[in-house]
Image (spheres, rainbow, N blue to C red):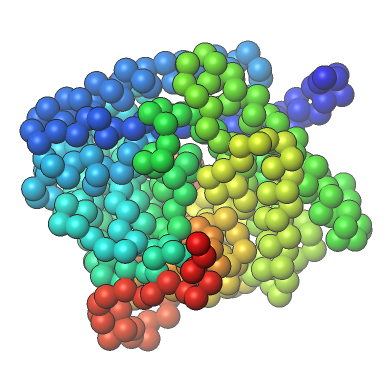
Amino acid sequence: MINMFEVNETNKMVEQENLDVRTITVGINLLDCADSNLDELNRKVYEKIVRIAKDLVKTGNDISREFGIPVVNKRISVTPIALVGQSACKTPQDFVTIAKTLDRAAKEVGVNFIGGYSAIVSKGMTPYEENLIRSIPEALASTERICSSVNVGSTKTGINMDAVRLLGDIVKETAEYTKEDDSLGCAKLVVLCNAPDDNPFMAGAFHGVSEADSIINVGVSGPGVVKYALSQVKNANFEVLCETIKKTAFKITRVGQLVAQEASKRMGIPFGIIDLSLAPTPAVGDSIAEILEEMGLERVGAPGTTAALAMLNDQVKKGGVMASSYVGGLSGAFIPVSEDQGMIDAVNAGALTIEKLEAMTCVCSVGLDMIAIPGDTKPETISGIIADESAIGMVNQKTTAVRIIPVIGKTVGEVAHFGGLLGYAPIMPVNNFDCSVFVNRGGRIPAPIHSFKN
């Protein structure tokens, strides 16, 4: 039973500590929309999305109002479009028509993002998957709400270096297509290794082929709540610190479970998973960096940062799995730069570099996220960064990702402005020693020895 103390405690977390349900994401299977006729395919895709998601925004707003819990975003994820469009799409431009259809459907139902303009090419690329990847720059430049992702590797398959090399060019081309908006298109493109089928968080969300026809996944976030809890145990030892994080994560996840079950009941769509990822925003007090600094670091990036992040991530997961039987997605701590004021301050203070961020990705939920780099960075360098991050995911059997933004026309010392939840980011220097011979070799980096389990 929920008692009055718990009610008051939750109200305080919402009102004073930035607790929110970051997203209700409806996953929709579009495989039954496949058609060899492109016009028919687009018609069926639009109609199915609108039919299933028509009440999503209203449901989220109603729950938010009735329960007093902010539901910030309502989103949709769909089956990777490379699979849906394989029969009808003969050119990259054919895929762009589907992107525009998805964007139109997203506007019709009122969601802020729709994810799944995606391809899964961890072991090899088919011609239609390559066409989708080559269409990404134009698709993101000609739409407002589309998010795109490409999975280039996994622990079981290794890393598809042909795809990695191609994506260096695609990221740079996307930056050029959207250079008037500080290369904003790259903020909606993520390259993944070990992508989960049920991630509700953009830009990497898609509806995996192992999922039901439609599903509701909820992403909960509460960096401010965790920071406040840690501020109450300032001089405690690590055991107390861990228990505090774990108990707080439990409470946050219970809020998400309540919202997820209520949304599922009202929309008549099965409940999938709760993703308890501490995802920051530009709002003051809603920062992963500030949590780590509350543990005793002068600045994120100082010695001890990776250990502190590892502990935070582990305790978040432990608290979450006690609160819900269906924790999934990524569930842990995101460490984007642009969306986290504490991270931005650490970069500006010289405490945080891309190399340190890469080390931190070994123990966090995702990877190099929302990092702005000089616009003249070579595509081969971007491919090398993607390869490094994919290797971390492959060897450590975890999801890693790269969402990097070469801001055309800007360099180190300048700032890129993305707006809204995406915030702003200082341009960070990259290591410009050449890796082109390595990334141009072609082929596949094989799976690690510990992948052979059957």
| 199 relative to 101, above or below | below
| Image spot of residue 283 (x, y percent) | 60, 42
Question: Relative to 81, is 243 on the left or the right?
Answer: right
| 231 relative to 46, above or below | below
At 60% from the left and 47% from the top, the residue drawn is 331
| 94 relative to 242, above or below | above
- Classify the position of the N terminus by image quarter: top right
| 233 relative to 406, above or below | above
| Image spot of residue 350 (x, y percent) | 59, 72
Residue 286's image quarter?
top right
Question: Relative to 212, is 1 on the left or the right?
Answer: right
Residue 407 appears in the figure: no
Residue 93 appears in the figure: yes
Camera-side residue: 180 or 189?
Answer: 189
How many labels, in total?
0
Camera-side residue: 402 or 235?
Answer: 402
Residue 121's image quarter?
bottom left
Question: Relative to 69, is 127 on the left or the right?
Answer: left
| Image spot of residue 363 (x, y percent) | 62, 64
At 55% from the left and 67% from the top, the residue drawn is 396
| Image spot of residue 23 (x, y percent) | 52, 33
At 17% from the left and 25% from the top, the residue drawn is 43
At 47% from the left and 49% from the top, the residue drawn is 196
Camera-side residue: 138 or 438?
Answer: 438
Residue that sits furthest to the front in the current view: 454
